[in-house]
Amino acid sequence: MARVFNFSAGPAALPEPVLAQVRDELLDWHGSGMSVMEMSHRGKEFMAIQAEAEADLRSLMGIPDNYRVLFLQGGATLQFAMVPLNLMPVGASADYVVTGSWSKKAVAEAKRYGTVKVAASSAETNFNRIPGQDELTLDPQAAYVHITSNNTIFGTEYHYTPDTGAVPLVADASSNILSRPVDVGRYGLIYAGAQKNIGPAGLTLVIVREDLIGRCRGGAPTLLDYAIHAENDSAYNTPPTFAIYVAGLVFKHLLAQGGLAAVEQANVDKAQLLYDVLDRSGFYSCPTELASRSRMNVPFTLADADLDATFLAESKQAGLVQLKGHRSVGGMRASIYNAMPRAGVQALVEFMIDFERRHG
């Protein structure tokens, strides 16, 4: 079997050593005689798996003791509602920085529960940049400030942490979590869907400061209250057990690589390899502002859009898949998350150079 280099924006590639371990343990986890998929979420075997996963994540990210780690479901999209339900009291407002499609959806959902103020937006330049600190119009009375730390569709990423003063900073970090060190203590809450850098789809990670728990407005569904999940160690109902298990293996894999500082250097190297080709070519172009470029998602276009279908067909034949850009913007997109090896980016670069030689 020949594995391809999968540049999907999500569900994305997983580290091969993790997949191999999952394969080896699939029928019999550590002599238990059963698969993790068959375990009771309240049994000692799975409870140990979850506790170890949390401990490793805390070590990886340097999560302070006054933060809770919740393993939830519903994707980052459900957090668009859970955040305002838990953090924005009735009659209050929240600030949102709008940098793409997902932050727009987060705004639309939050408006169902309170007043949303747009602190800054890059819509006027088709979301090709991240607004700087000096562009943020922040309300000191806001319940929180919400950002999307990396934008998969438009290929932009925050390379600074906004200063929000005493107002809690909330980040949808779905597509760049675990790609670099983060000072968790500067955030009130970080959430992320798992299917890009953490593990399989179905798991949602929430890291929330303890003083922000227990504020859920009355009338909200029980499962949308962070306090319920915190009080029950993410097991008020059956959690996504297999996804948590795989995520735990990913955490160990990243620790074995040297932690997030080493992971960041690898990601910088991979991204630079690809951006260098884009920048020195007249055949390819990247629409993203230089200072806002994402290390995780690299959109690019061809000088002749009529060649897009040929590029995709030939790249797939070369074992380079899922390079089609998002339907809302077109072009191409290479998602090069943690699990994408440098060899995959090198193969893409070599293909791009050859394609330009033949079609440019």
Image (spheres, helix red, strand yellow):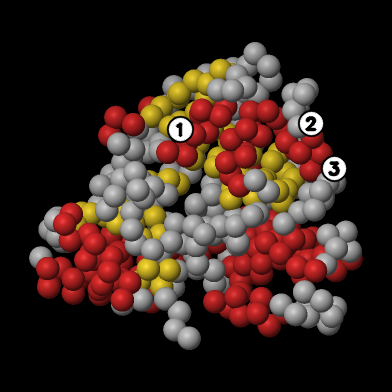
CA distance for labels 3 and 1: 32 Å
Task: Describe the element under mark 3 as helix, strand or loop.
Answer: helix
Mark 1 belongs to which amino acid? Answer: Lys
Say which of marks 2 and 1 sits in front.
Answer: 1
Mark 3 belongs to which amino acid? Answer: Glu
Residue 328 visible to the viewer: yes
Which of disc 1 and disc 3 is earlier in sequence? 1
Residue holding disc 1: 104
Residue 145 at x, y = what percent? 55, 29
CA distance for labels 2 and 1: 27 Å
- Mark 3 burial class by Cα count in 10 Å: few <14, some 14-19, many 20+: few
Compared across the picture, whether 244 is left or right of 93 comes to right
**Which of the 4 image quarters holds residue 258?**
bottom right
Residue 228 at x, y = what percent? 81, 39
Residue holding disc 2: 214
Compared across the picture, whether 333 is left or right of 163 comes to left
**Which of the 4 image quarters holds residue 227?**
top right
Please tell me which residue is depicted at 45% across the width and 79% down the height of the picture: 3
Please tell me which residue is depicted at 85% across the width and 63% down the height of the picture: 40
Residue holding disc 3: 231
Q: Are marks 3 and 1 in contact (CB under 8 Å)?
A: no
